[in-house]
Image (tube, rainbow, N blue to C red):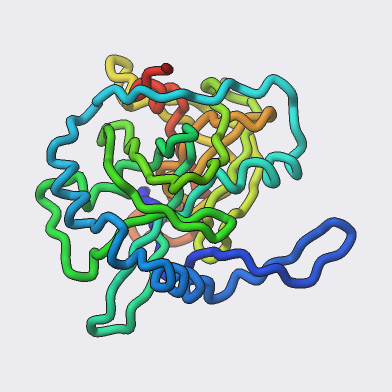
Amino acid sequence: MSRNKLIWGLLLWIPFIGVSGQNVTYRNFDSFEKETLRTLKESGATSTFNSMHNLKRQTLQTKANSIVPVTLKAANKKTISGEKLVAERSEGIFVVSRYAPKMVRDEQVVAGASAVVLSEDGICVSNYHVFEPVIDTTRVLTPLDSIFFVAAKSGKIYPITEVLSYNATSDLAIFKIDPKGDKLTVTPVGQDLPAGANIHALTHVYGHLFYYSKGVVARNLCTSELNADTNRSDITADYCKGSSGGPLFDDCGNLVGIVSTTQSIYYNEQSQTDLQMVVKTIIPISSVLRLLKQQ
């Protein structure tokens, strides 16, 4: 069985409204990284945003499992439709991106993964493996690792200012952005779900940003009953690479988990032929909450 982390690159969604009718809006998802690059350059962000090298130096002072004070949004109590969930939660789901300056290739924006807004002052959550290049002291950055930032569905961009906490076992990183005075769309936080419960994914599937899928919790599992950081849930809602750090919601639109990995199951494991199933595994919200302290 092969386990795959879900970072991808070279595509970033910036809104462009195409044809619409009967309250359905169609958007063009092609070549939006050029629009983001233009935004970065026109705003001067390529010289003012926190660099990955500086972020890595700052993160040397960050301790694993640090408890982060945060004002979380209370859970929504009413069931909402899938349409409403997508409409109301999308702006609180960021695309984690990197600016690569012109060297061998032309300068470009590289979209890597997802992050979820937890507070109005810019505290967010994503995967440890998304932030591993700036957390892991053994990883060496290159000149192409220039600026780490996030982009919202609206096309606004925000600098990542610091990594506040992380846990490699639970595959989580808590970080902060500078909202620049904007009112962020904060995601309400729910609870872990039992097996059989409905679950909704809204993630940046490779080449298909803000992709909605619905399924159920297939099972809850751990690799050590003595270590809650190993808790995971397998789900049937669909996602693939590009979805790292993406949110999972309950029927009320509350955050109940974070995407982590996929596991491909082949009939012939040795040759990896005859793919039969891809298991999607997420991190339950309880693991996120262990790194936070409600203010």
**Residue 160 at x, y percent in the picture:** 34, 49
The vertical placement of 235 against 49, above or below, is above
Q: Quadrant of residue 164?
A: top left
- Residue depicted at 48% across the width and 45% down the height: 181
In terms of depth relative to the viewer, which is nearer, 74 or 240?
Answer: 74
* Horizontal relation, residue 89 to residue 107: left or right: right
* Horizontal relation, residue 233 to residue 88: left or right: left
* Horizontal relation, residue 290 to residue 162: left or right: right
The vertical placement of 143 against 285, above or below, is below
**Residue 123 at x, y percent in the picture:** 40, 36
- Residue depicted at 45% across the width and 74% down the height: 38
* Horizontal relation, residue 290 to residue 81: left or right: left
Can you name the residue that lies furthest to the right here? 22
In terms of depth relative to the viewer, which is nearer, 143 or 265?
Answer: 143
The vertical placement of 108 against 7, above or below, is below
Quadrant that contains the C terminus: top left
Can you name the residue that lies furthest to the front here? 181
The vertical placement of 57 against 189, above or below, is below
Figure label count: 0
- Residue depicted at 87% across the width and 64% down the height: 21
**Residue 240 at x, y percent in the picture:** 49, 54
- Residue depicted at 54% across the width and 20% down the height: 191
Q: Is residue 257 visible?
A: yes
Can you name the residue that lies furthest to the left here? 138
Q: Is residue 2 visible?
A: no
**Residue 221 at x, y percent in the picture:** 43, 25
